[in-house]
Image (cartoon, helix red, strand yellow):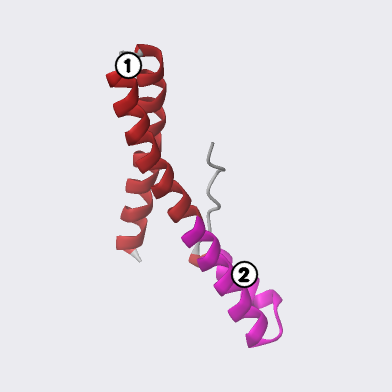
Amino acid sequence: MISMDKYYSYTDFLKAVGHYQHANESEKLLNDIYLDLFLNRMQRLQRIEQLKDLIDSALDERNEEAFYEYTKELSELQETQEMEESQESVM
C-alpha cells in the first residue's frame, strides 16, 4: 500500500527557512520537499496503472471480491491525484 503523502505548504516552507541561517540549507530543504513530492507522485501513478491491470484480471477471472477491492483503492488514489493537481493549479 502507498504511504500517506506528506503535506508541505508555502507557509511551512517559510517557517522552516526562518529557522535556517544559510540559504544553502533552505535550498536543500526545498529540494528535499520537491523530491519527496515527485517520488510520491510517481509511486502513486505506478500503483494506479498496476491497479488498472489488476482490475482487468479480476474481471477476466470473474473475481468480484478482488474487483471491488482494487476499484476502491483506485478510486481513492485518483481522488488524491485530483486533489494534488488542483492544489498545483492554485500555486
| 36 with respect to 65 (left or right) | right
Residue at left offset 31%, top offset 54%: 86
Residue at left offset 57%, top offset 64%: 12
Residue at left offset 50%, top offset 61%: 9
Q: Which residues are magenta?
A: 12-39
Residue 44, percent from left and from top: 44, 47
Which of the two discs, 2 and 1, labels the residue nearer the N terminus?
Answer: 2
Question: Does residue 52 appear in the picture of this structure?
Answer: yes
Residue at left offset 34%, top offset 21%: 58
Magenta region includes residue 34:
yes
Residue 62, percent from left and from top: 30, 13
Eyeballing the image, is 70 above or below 42?
Answer: above
| 52 with respect to 24 (left or right) | left
Helix, strand or loop for disc 2: helix
Type of the residue with mark 2: Lys
Type of the residue with mark 1: Glu
Mostly what secondary structure, the magenta segment? helix
Please name the residue that numbered disc 1 is placed on. 61
Please name the residue that numbered disc 2 is placed on. 15
**Residue 89: numbered disc:** none
Eyeballing the image, is 90 above or below 29?
Answer: above
How busy is the neighbourhood of tag 1: few (under 14 within 10 Å), some, or many (20 plus)? few
Helix, strand or loop for disc 1: loop
Eyeballing the image, is 6 above or below 61?
Answer: below
Residue 24, percent from left and from top: 64, 85
Q: Give the CA distance from mark 2 to mark 1.
A: 53 Å
